[in-house]
Structures are given as structure tokens and as C-alpha cells.
Image (tube, rainbow, N blue to C red):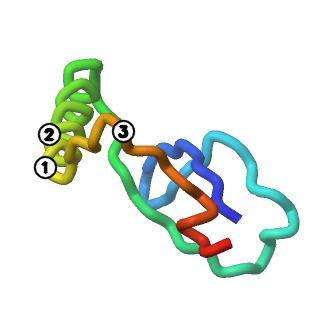
Amino acid sequence: MTKILEATYSNGSLILSEALDANLEGKKLKVVILEAEEDEADRIAKVRRFLAHAKQYSFALPSDYKFDRDELYDR
């Protein structure tokens, strides 16, 4: 299961924005910490960095290129 929640860190504890499912009780969970953007300018800067990174790995396809799923999976 993957779920993204917001939380506030206070006095050494994470306070979740909503309760977790009861079926998770007693299970070990992995937590990834991502600091929330402070404002719109931070969000825009992150998007621009991502697009610049993605552009490094982009390439132009020939104008007559056609994706063939059957060929990909040898059907």
C-alpha cells in the first residue's frame, strides 16, 4: 500500500493530517520525509529543476515513428 499524507512535526512526533487504516495497526511502516514547499516560488523552482533534468534525457523521435506495443512484447 502506498499513501501520501501531510504531517506536522511537533515535539519529536509527527502529527498526521488524517488517521491511518486500522489494518496497519502493529505493522512496521517506511516513512519518506519530504519538506513541504514554503511558497509558490519554491514549487515553481522545483518544477523548473525537474524539467531541466528531464530535458537532458529527452530526444526527438522521427516524424514517422509509431509505437507498436505488440512488437515490444513480441506478440
Work out which residue is located at the far right of the displayed protein and give it: 23
- The quadrant of the picture occupied by the N terminus is bottom right
Which residue occupies the extreme top position in the image? 40
Residue at the disc numbered 2: 52
- Residue found 48% across the figure and 44% down from its top: 8
Give the farthest residue toward the front.
Answer: 64
Q: Secondary structure at mark 2?
A: helix
Vertical side of 12 occupied by 38: above or below: above
Residue at the disc numbered 1:
56
Q: Position of residue 33 (x, y in %)?
A: 40, 58
Residue at 65 percent of width and 80 percent of height: 28
Q: Amino acid at mark 3?
A: Asp
Measured Cα–Cα span from mark 2 to mark 3:
27 Å
Q: CB of mark 2 within 8 Å of CB of mark 1?
A: yes
- Left or right: residue 61 versus residue 15 is left
| Residue 63 percent location from the top left of the image | 31, 35
Label 3's element?
loop
Kindly report the distance in space between the C-alpha atoms of the residues bearing marks 3 and 1.
Answer: 23 Å
Secondary structure under tag 1 reads helix
Q: Which residue is more in the foreground, 54 or 59?
A: 59
User: Which callout, 3 or 1, points to the residue nearer the camera?
Assistant: 3
Residue at x 20% of width, y 46% of height: 59
**Mark 2 or 3, nearer chain start:** 2
Question: Which kind of residue does numbered mark 2 sit on?
Answer: Ala
Q: Which residue is mark 3?
A: 64
What's the amino acid at mark 1? Gln
> Image height check: is 60 above or below 45?
below
